[in-house]
Image (tube, grey):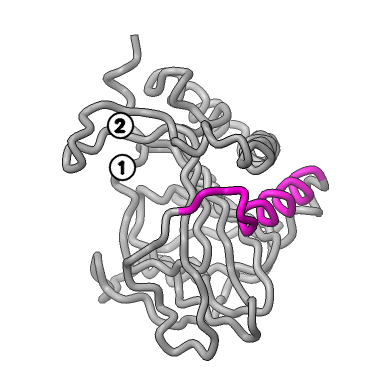
Amino acid sequence: MKYIELQSRPYPEKVGGTCGTIEPNLTEDAIFYEDGIPVGFYIKNLSTYSEKASSYAELADRELRSPRVPKSEMRRSSGLHDATFDVRQYSVILGGVPPKPHMRRNYPTVSSVHSVGSAANFIKAMLLLCRESENIIKEIMPEQYEFQKLAIQQNAPPEYRFGELFTSSISNFNIAANYHTDNANLRGCVNVIIAKRKSSTGGNTTIPEYGVTVDSCDNSMLVYPAWKSLHGVTPIIPLAEGGYRNSLVFYPLKSFAKYVS
């Protein structure tokens, strides 16, 4: 695994700015360091670390694309306006959902998808994938694993957890993202982003502060503190009918801390 010391640099990108097409410059297994401390890593092919994780990701991806799982259609900019083929864009949230006062819901809840019987295989596959991802984090970054496990125990009641290191999961299908930081995440913690794709390009995570754009190839895994730096997801362009890029994401929210007894 390649060792990369992240070097901060000036950059012009701003929160909310459009993330254009950027070719990846990180295409091999790597662990990221900042001031000598490991802060994340990239695995090009999950199978090299866990055949189980690879099989769970395949199952979750297949179930997500089936009519058995309810979806939320996305209305934000997709980065797909120049695509030759029309595609659907949607997301599915699992695990803890924070309070949403603007929707007149001032309390946390659990994703309604958990109550849909036909989504059971998808939920199970995502939970198993989450646990395997946590095992990989424990192997590569044991200190981060222990820190994040304790952070979740201290900041999220059991009913609002997804696995041991996260509160929530989102699966984004064909969705690019403007530049942003994940300000709702627990500080010091990492996200997991697993990519599944077919006949498409783009969907790469780019971090302008470090000049790094990570290859979102099929079956890849990115572990990174998304709260820490501005980042975006490049446009996803299908190359054939039915082409897509799906990201299976696990993340730790800080919104549940005041509900810990």
**Closer to the camera in the image, 230 or 37:** 230
Residues in magenta, as a range: 52-71
Sequence-wise, the earlier of marks 1 and 2 is 1
Q: Position of residue 131 (x, y in %)?
A: 66, 34
211 w.r.t. 237: above or below:
above
Image side of residue 16 versus residue 143, left or right? left
User: Mostly what secondary structure, the magenta segment?
Assistant: helix
Residue 198 higher or lower than 64, as above or below: below
Q: Position of residue 124 (x, y in %)?
A: 67, 35
Q: CA distance from mark 1 to mark 2?
A: 7 Å
In this image, 58 relative to 254: left or right? right
Circle 2: is it few (<14), some (14-19), or many (20+) Cα within 10 Å? some
Instruction: Please determine whether, in this image, residue 203 is positioned above or below residue 223.
Output: below
Residue 142 is one of the magenta-drawn residues: no
* Residue drawn at point x = 51 percent, y = 49 percent: 70
Q: Which residue is mark 1?
A: 184
Q: Is residue 29 left or right of residue 183?
A: right
Examine the rendering and report whether any part of residue 31 can be seen. Answer: no
Identified by mark 1, the residue type is: Ala
Task: Name the quadrant of the N terminus.
Answer: bottom right
Residue sitting at x 80%, y 53%: 47
Kindly indicate the quadrant of the structure image that contains residue 222. bottom right
Q: Position of residue 113 (x, y in %)?
A: 50, 39
Which residue bears the numbered disc 2? 255
Q: Is residue 111 visible?
A: yes
Q: Residue at x 43, y 72 (%)?
A: 211
Q: Secondary structure at mark 2?
A: loop
Badge 1 element: loop
Q: Residues within 10 Å of mark 1 (few under 14, many from 20)?
A: some
